[in-house]
Image (tube, rainbow, N blue to C red):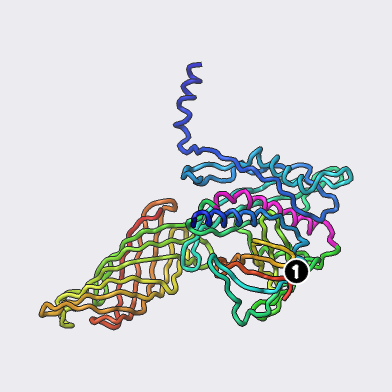
């Protein structure tokens, strides 16, 4: 008895991550189907984890989401509302291979937006000589984009995307399974090789980095914020803003007739790509437009300002050993043309250190 | 007053979302009429004048977009309130339906460049 009590007391410490729970109840929504009498007789949940995912709720607490009444009952009731069981109907069994809701961010029109997904993977079975046998499988994503400050709408519509995904799967099944004589072509016949259904939204990385740079004429420091969605294939298009403070190296300033040359530059990106080489290592390539000003002090001690604008390019590497949060290191080569009083063309290297979160 | 207006707008938008849409509501030719954002209406640019979508009962469609003709199949997802068009290139396009009546159809194209515009179609020129 005492031992039980002890275990009970220790239990909270054994699981370091226990989140609160919230349930998602599907609104009973009827949708029109042209069915010859197929109805969902049973739903089997074959997922190892029965939750829909863990996300921050609107109060900012991390909660694990579940389907109200459990996924099996919820989905069966949902389909029953639109396809009532009939005595002469055809019973269908549905197996749930995957069902979850996801949140991430991505770049949109030069800004950052939220993106939400309901992912579903279903197998449809019918009874053939007394045995359930597979007749149709479908993986489907319902993705929706929201403004960066519209997290409320995103969170409140997870339920709706699940319903939309369920409806999509059923329409696809019925279109393929039942002969639809009045239809010219099956809308749901899509080449999955050309349009694969990715089960997961890419993870969003936030990088805050500082860099030290040295070039033929200048040296200095800069800070950057970079946000990007990880992707194994293809080019990644990160969002970045950065600011640099640099100064002409003393001997270079003197050669040009100045005591001091300081330069303050923003660097909007024209083209900016990351390419994942392997897990945690990315190559980067950029073309940018440095914009800012130089403050110059000549040998007599007179100050003047000079507006600078130019064209820059850089090639580099970023190493992000820890995915969730941790250290970022990197290095870049860069080249640039600028309307500087000191140079027209400059090239150099920069060393980057920062964190990701 | 401004807040009240905002509240009203929100209520109206919510009502629109709650509108029950039916496949039959879409079986007609929809002519591009105008665009709008939160503040104003805009006339379509010259190259889009005459653009239309014909949604047929057999779930095929024909559309003219920027003067270019295309055809394919379409579907309505009632729960997600969207139309999905699959053109000859096999690429799909998603159009969120904000309002539909026999005379008018308001959608938002689920494409980054157009997501900020509501697109208004009318059923007769």
Image quadrant in which you'd find residue A200: bottom right
Instruction: Indicate the chain on which mark 1 is placed.
Output: B
Q: Main secondary structure of the magenta part?
A: helix
Query: Which of these two is toward me, A179 or A85?
Result: A85
Left/right placement of residue A211 relative to residue B8 reads left
Residue drawn at point x = 30 percent, y = 71 percent = A265
Where A11 falls versus A273 (above or below)? above
- Number of marks in the rendered image: 1
Badge 1 crowding class, 10 Å Cα cut-off, few under 14, some 14 to 19, many 20 or more, is: many
Residue drawn at point x = 71 percent, y = 42 percent = A44
Where A47 falls versus B4 (above or below)? above
Q: Residue furthest front?
A: B1
Query: Which of these two is toward me, A339 or A191?
Result: A339
Q: Residue furthest left?
A: A300
Image quadrant in which you'd find residue A48: top right
Residue B32 image point, x, y percent: 67, 74
Left/right placement of residue A42 relative to residue A142 reads right
Which stretch appears magenta?
A153-180
Q: Which residue is mark 1?
A: B55
Residue A200 appearing in the image: no
Where A54 falls versus A328 (above or below)? above
Q: Secondary structure at mark 1?
A: strand
Left/right placement of residue A287 relative to residue A177 reads left
Query: Which of these two is toward me, B85 or A156?
Result: A156
Residue A176 in the magenta stretch? The answer is yes
Residue drawn at point x = 47 percent, y = 38 percent = A17
Residue A99 appearing in the image: yes
Residue A305 in the magenta stretch? The answer is no
Residue A155 image point, x, y percent: 55, 50
Image quadrant in which you'd find residue A175: bottom right
């Amino acid at each position: 008895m005492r031992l039980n009590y002890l275990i009970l007391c220790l239990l909270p410490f054994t699981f370091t991550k226990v989140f609160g729970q919230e349930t998602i109840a599907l609104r009973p929504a009827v949708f029109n189907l042209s069915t010859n009498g197929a109805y969902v007789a049973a739903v089997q949940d074959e997922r190892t984890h029965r939750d829909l995912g863990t996300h921050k709720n609107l109060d900012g607490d991390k909660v694990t989401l579940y389907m109200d009444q459990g996924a099996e009952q919820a989905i069966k009731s949902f389909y029953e509302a639109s396809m009532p069981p009939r005595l002469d109907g055809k019973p269908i069994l549905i197996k749930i291979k995957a069902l979850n809701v996801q949140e991430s961010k991505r770049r949109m029109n030069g800004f950052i937006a939220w993106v939400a997904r309901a992912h579903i993977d279903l197998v449809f079975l019918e009874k053939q000589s007394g045995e359930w046998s597979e007749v149709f499988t479908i993986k489907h994503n319902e993705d929706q984009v929201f403004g960066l400050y519209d997290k409320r709408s995103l969170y409140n519509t997870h339920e709706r995307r699940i319903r939309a995904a369920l409806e999509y799967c059923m329409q696809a099944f019925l279109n393929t399974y039942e002969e639809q004589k009045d239809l010219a072509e099956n809308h749901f016949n899509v080449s999955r090789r050309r349009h694969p259904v990715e089960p997961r939204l890419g993870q969003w990385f936030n990088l805050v980095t500082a860099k030290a740079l040295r070039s033929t004429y200048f040296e200095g420091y800069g800070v950057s914020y970079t946000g990007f969605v990880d992707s194994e294939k293809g080019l990644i298009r990160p969002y970045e803003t950065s600011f640099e403070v640099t100064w002409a190296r003393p001997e270079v300033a003197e050669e040009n007739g100045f005591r001091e040359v300081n330069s303050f530059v923003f660097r909007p990106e024209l083209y900016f790509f990351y390419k994942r080489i392997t897990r945690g290592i990315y190559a980067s390539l950029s073309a940018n437009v440095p914009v800012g000003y130089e403050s110059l002090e000549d040998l007599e001690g007179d100050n003047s300002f000079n507006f600078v604008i130019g064209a820059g390019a850089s090639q580099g590497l970023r190493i992000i050993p820890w995915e969730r949060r941790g250290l970022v290191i990197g290095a870049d080569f860069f080249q640039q043309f600028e309307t500087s009083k000191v140079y027209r063309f400059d090239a150099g290297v920069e060393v980057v250190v920062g964190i990701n979160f | 007053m401004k807040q009240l207006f905002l509240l009203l707008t929100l209520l109206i938008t919510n009502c629109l979302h709650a509108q029950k849409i039916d496949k039959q509501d879409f079986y007609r030719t929809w002519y591009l009429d105008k665009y709008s954002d939160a503040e104003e209406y805009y006339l379509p640019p010259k190259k889009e004048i005459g653009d239309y979508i014909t949604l047929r009962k057999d779930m095929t469609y024909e559309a003219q977009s920027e003067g270019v003709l295309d055809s394919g199949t379409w579907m309505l997802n009632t729960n997600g309130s969207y139309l999905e068009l699959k053109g000859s290139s096999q690429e799909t396009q998603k159009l969120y339906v904000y309002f539909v009546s026999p005379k008018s159809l308001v959608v938002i194209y689920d494409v980054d460049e157009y997501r900020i515009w509501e697109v208004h179609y009318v059923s007769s020129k």
